[in-house]
Image: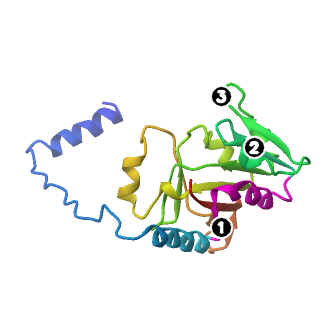
Amino acid sequence: MSAKEEILGRIRTALADNPHVEPVVRDYRTTSQLSETEVIELLVDRLVDYKAGVDVIEAEQIATHVAAKLATARSVVYPHGLDTGWLQQLPESIERRIDAPGHALDIPVLDETSAVVTSSAVSIAESGTIILDGEPDQGRRAISLVPDHHVCIVPVSTIVQLLPEAMPRMDVTRPQTWISGPSATSDIELERVEGVHGPRTLDVLIVRGL
């Protein structure tokens, strides 16, 4: 008997008496009572607590703020569906690298790229979580995980307070990246190490009117 057959046999034995399964009570909150301003303030509070840089701006200020965040960058990668107007104020000295289907940048190139700029799909204020789902303005998971600096555009229209509000907005079959602050972990002695699983620096631009 294989291990698989043994495991399935034990499961069948355990379920032989057809035990009754109680229905799951789903009485948790599914809608927010906060105003738009309160939801933005909550998201900002959580992101700052995670040591992310955060600015709340108007749509016409995106290019200016992106350029300011990337002032010291040597190169930047962006997904093929990103609004290139957001990059128009970058200095000519910053090399721009586009990542597109059929022309995906390899890992060594991404590793030597200073920063990445993406949009985002949904953000959950209560947990301070930004979700990317691989749409053309967000790109492959690799481009948001390998470069050391991530500048993420968060439209106010995509912010919700609660996780149950976020799930219906997403296609759960798409590859997703859930971001709660810059990448960080701690070893057994609780020494914080940044940049292990993703960008060491996260700058979030929360955009009104977008």
Disc number at residue 55? 1
Crowdedness of circle 1 by 10 Å Cα count: few (<14), some, many (20+)? few
Q: Please report the residue visible at 22 percent of the width from the left and 42 percent of the height from the top.
A: 11
* Label 2: element kind: strand
Please report whichever mark, 3 or 1, sits nearer to the chain's N-terminal start. Answer: 1
Residue denoted by label 2:
77
Image coordinates for residue 198, horizontal then vertical, percent: 66, 54
Q: Please report the residue visible at 30 percent of the width from the left and 61 percent of the height from the top.
A: 30
* Label 1: element kind: strand
Q: Is residue 199 visible?
A: no
- Lateral position of residue 156 relative to residue 57, left or right: left
Magenta stretch in the rendered image = 51-73
Name the amino acid, label 3. Answer: Pro
Image coordinates for residue 203, horizontal then vertical, percent: 68, 62
**Do labels 2 and 3 touch, CB within 8 Å?**
no
Disc number at residue 183? none
Residue 164: image quadrant is: bottom left
Count of number-bearing discs: 3
Name the amino acid, label 2. Answer: Val
From the viewer's perspective, is residue 134 above or below residue 188? above
Disc number at residue 101? 3
Please report whichever mark, 1 or 2, sits nearer to the chain's N-terminal start. Answer: 1
- Lateral position of residue 85 relative to residue 140, left or right: right
Image coordinates for residue 53, horizontal then vertical, percent: 68, 68
Please report whichever mark, 2 or 3, sits nearer to the chain's N-terminal start. Answer: 2
Q: CA distance from mark 2 to mark 3?
A: 14 Å
